[in-house]
Image (cartoon, rainbow, N blue to C red):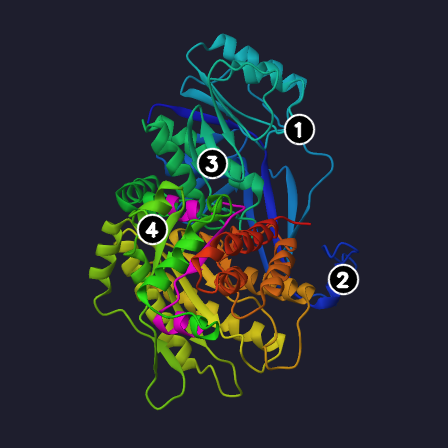
Amino acid sequence: MSNKILIVGNVLKDIYLRLDERKEEIEHDETNTKWLNWGFNGSSHEFFRRTSVYSGAVVTLEVLRKFGIGAEIINEVAKVDKGGVELDEIKTANYRYILQAEDQISYLVPSEKTPTEFPLETLPAEYKWIFLDRSAVLSQALTEKLLKILDARKDVRFAFYVPKRITKPAIPLAERADLLFTDGDMKGIYPRGKVCFISETGVRIGKSEVAFSGLKKTDLLTHLTTYSIIAATLLGSALRGKTIGDSLLMARLNIENTKLDETVEFEKLEELVREEKTHGVDLRMMAAQIMARGKGILAADESGGSIHKKFEALKIPDDFAHRRDYREMLLTTPNLENYINGVILFDETARQKTYFGENFVDYLTEKGIIPGIKVDLGLKTIADSKETYTTGLEGLPERLEEYYEMGLRFAKWRAAFEISETTPTKNAVLKNVAILADYALLCQRARIVPIVEPEVVYDGDYSIEKCAAVTGIILRELFEELKKKEVQLNAVILKVNMILSGKKSGETSTPLEVGDWTSRVLRRFVPKEVAGVVFLSGGQTPTQATENLQSVTNQGPFPWPVSFSFARALQDPALEAWAGDHANAPKAQEKFLERLIANASALKKN
């Protein structure tokens, strides 16, 4: 291409050190915040991984060259192949150390950054762009030299990544830029060109934006490197003639598919954009709406057997009319939409109507609540075993097609695992996660967001440590199977048990224990790309479930949105107050609303 670019910035070298996870190296302060204990030496501390990669201006160079754009870093000789960037002449300005232990990440960076050099007095004719990279350390002399060159070469266009804390020398350059990138405050700066705002949650140019639903890459890329990839992708996309919308989409896709030392080829990004436009974007956006922060999911999907047990305990007749009345009491609760993003329905309920003749699915949709559906058909025993697997795959594509036409936009499938001395077996785990993955793939093909629910049953005799170990094994196998079958993880929601000792163990896990164990297991086994994590209550009391949810929240932030998808912990007080009598509906709705408010509040850290 004719638009050859000169990149002005510093080449950095990032040293990633994955430290061991021994307890004595992690300390907790009085607020229970984890801190890395720096008191270690090489003889006593094991490094599980040591990786060195170039960053800074090299990241920008690699992206642009993979877009087929001629680019060079001033004062450096570099080449790019499919394995990333190699420097023939290394003039690394600074080293940065990125240390990881458990779920914590810490940075060691030089306090005095090396100023960026610019040895040229004039710009060679082949360069049509100058890109002042985010890694550049500006001085007054560099600013003056760049302004002089831009004045002399009216044909040269200028792109600039403004530092987050903008310094005085940067202001005249920012106002001169044809394309400006920033992750800071632009107050008092008036650029003549387009401005691209970059953050951890998304990218915006004018009124066009793309969200990063829970995007976190700190396990692979520093935030500085992430932002550099985004900016270079946007610049490269613009030079390749892409629309703003496609450029923003390419930026997100490049981040999501980048490896530690290798960004994505332009042709591959074009292919990913085409795939996303055909089906992926709808699923991803729907999953993000279901997981919108501050609200949960109501599980109102009890099968015939489950609702029968509930009604029988309170001597409520288990017939079509009473089941409909009960669902209506819940779903018509005033202000339900303030606390709930979605409702999981049972097939019968999805076909029922309110007292005034409106279908429940349409009623929820009009209130801004997304309707979903339970699609598994219950448990069967595995041959020669007491363990179970979930049925319902046969005929599922046809049922999903009908549900989509009915207006249902997500689905749920539960697999149950009981802990004993001999269970769950590897066979039971692998069989159930394979079924969950098949279900998830069928859902996505039907344009329905899947909720995968591998539940460790609470009604058992086991310790919190055992619950953590078993849940971790199940989650590891589940996500390996989902990836193997190429299920879009950014359009999958995980519904999972909290980590706590079993109900029959004689032990009661404290909220602090539940929050700590649950956050550790999830961070270790749930990929960052997943659209969200919601918890089932699993037989906990309403108060217990809320207190444990609050404790998990306090361990955040997490790489994905975290919320609740409770059934009994939301419904039980309301069901007892209702007791099958329509006259009790207002009182029952008050009880229901109390639990909704309590759990929505538990999604905020305290």
Residue under label 3 = 230
| Amino acid type, mark 1 | Pro
SS state under label 3: helix
Residue under label 1 = 115
Quadrant (top left, top right, bottom left, bottom right) of the N terminus: top left
Residue under label 4 = 354
* N-term mark: 4 or 2: 2
Query: For the point 40% across and 42% down, which residue is it?
Result: 368
Separation of residues labelled 3 and 4 (CA atoms): 48 Å
Q: Position of residue 292 (x, y in %)?
A: 48, 45
- Which is closer to the viewer, label 4 or label 2? 4
Q: Position of residue 123 (x, y in %)?
A: 49, 17
Q: Determine whether 244 is above or below 455 in the image.
A: above
SS state under label 1: loop
Separation of residues labelled 4 and 1 (CA atoms): 69 Å
Separation of residues labelled 3 and 1 (CA atoms): 24 Å
| Amino acid type, mark 3 | Ile
User: Does the CB distance between marks 2 and 3 fall below 8 Å?
Assistant: no
Regarding residue 89, the answer to whether it shows in the image is no
User: Does the CB distance between marks 3 and 1 fall below 8 Å?
Assistant: no
* N-term mark: 3 or 4: 3
Categorize mark 1 by other alpha carbons within 10 Å: few (<14), some (14-19), many (20+).
Answer: some
* Stretch of the chain drawn in magenta: 285-309
Categorize mark 4 by other alpha carbons within 10 Å: few (<14), some (14-19), many (20+).
Answer: some
User: Does the CB distance between marks 4 and 2 fall below 8 Å?
Assistant: no
Separation of residues labelled 4 and 2 (CA atoms): 68 Å
Regarding residue 542, the answer to whether it shows in the image is yes
Residue under label 2 = 41
